Amino acid sequence: MLKIILQSTHTISPFNEPARDLRIQNKPLWLYQRDVLSPYIHREIELPPGAEIPKTNEPCIVYRDNLFFDCDYIKEFITQAKQRNEASQAAFSKNDAAFIEHCLPLSISYTEDNNQYLAELWYYPNGYEPISKPLVIGMQAKEIGYYHVPTYMAFEQGDLVYYVPLRSMIAIDSWVHVFIADIVFGLFGRGARFENKLEQDPLFKIKILFSAILEGKQVLESSRIVKVGRNCVIDPTAVIHGPTTIGDHVTIGAGTVIENCLIGDNVNISQGCQVMLSVVGDGTFLPFRAALFMTTIMDNCLVAQNTCLQMSVIGRNTFIGAGTTFTDFNLLSTPIKARDGNGELKHSNRPTLGGCVGHNCRLGAGMVVFPARMIESDVVLLASKERRVIDKDVSYEDSDHHRLIASPLVKRIYPRPGEEIEESW
């Protein structure tokens, strides 16, 4: 099958970078897409914006490069499209709970069509055709709890739940969609599929129990659920529960607790860290007592000691100073707003949500970041009496390095579209 990739010109704030280059599930999105589609594809074409789709007589799959989709969704989409044997476009029903809760808010990529929404993913059995029929693929959502708010603070929320899909697809138009793809669709989805397999496959359950007995471990700590790469050093007092995947050359210190995470290569997690339902990128360093909850950290970051990140997304090559806290809940009964794909503030449809930091940032110690606030790429923030609480978005123009002595270490690497990179100060 031929794969045709349509490039998106939209960049994701605050990273100032197209979605295809952001890391999802610890891989650049373009690489994740390639790996998911590899069983079906024998060659590919990538088209720049505005280019015409070439004529061909062979089966082909066409998609926009800002889409995140998993193996289960693509398998079902291609299977049903082949059975129809006609040009088909991926669609979602307005009754799909996971789509309405997670995908539609803050998005600019879907087209409304009667009682459904069309996504930029097509299958053509005999080459490109100008007209295609919608093909609705349900995401098979399961209701899974993730947060408990005390009743006196609940504001009619109480126990908070996600509609977690067993097969998923989402257009990455906002940084919030990175959080959804990594945490809700990625880690929560992996856990939901694991539970389904336990219920439906008795042999799989027996193998896990046998492995745990043989290794003398609890079931959730056995090697069939916790996958550890090569040349890793893990302190025996560390507690690691699965499903968890740990990459190569990883060091995990004493007293660390890791639960349902995706840990990249060359990661150092020091003593007493708490990492739960999080994606930790390659080359990241977490000093002692750092805490991550439902957070994505891209590659080569440093999150200093006693820092707490909740439901947040951190870009590449970023430093977060000691004792900094990213909050995720509005104490007042006001909905959390976030920037959509057009940069406008809209309801995020999230009762709890952390913040986002772009690439190549440096944040000083002891800061407090309010929910859904963004800090643009290449920003330097120093903690001061005037700015210790971040209660609004921080742009590059607000960076503290503008009033510091020029330094060759402080350069803009990720400008906004149309801006030029400054070579020197």
Image (cartoon, grey):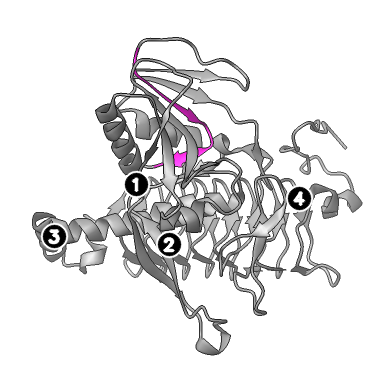
Q: Which mark is residue 205?
A: 3
SS assignment at label 2:
loop
Circles 3 and 2, Cβ within 8 Å, touching? The answer is no
Q: Is residue 419 left or right of residue 183?
A: right
What amino acid is at disc 4?
Val
Q: Which residue is mark 2?
A: 277
Measured as percent of width and height from the top left, residue 405 is found at 89, 49
What amino acid is at disc 1?
Asn
Q: CA distance from mark 3 to mark 4?
A: 49 Å
- Which quadrant of the figure has residue 240? bottom left
Q: Which range of residues does the magenta coloring cover?
A: 58-69
SS assignment at label 4:
loop
Q: Which residue is mark 4?
A: 379
Would residue 261 be seen by someone viewing this image from the given angle?
A: no
Q: Nearer the viewer, residue 247 or 100?
A: 100
Mark before the other along the chain sequence, 3 or 2:
3
Relative height, residue 353 to residue 99 (above, below): below
- Mark 2, Cα crowd under 10 Å, few <14 / some 14-19 / many 20+, is many
- Mark 4, Cα crowd under 10 Å, few <14 / some 14-19 / many 20+, is many
Q: CA distance from mark 1 to mark 3?
A: 29 Å
Q: Which residue is mark 1?
A: 231
- Which quadrant of the figure has residue 321? bottom right
- Mark 1, Cα crowd under 10 Å, few <14 / some 14-19 / many 20+, is few
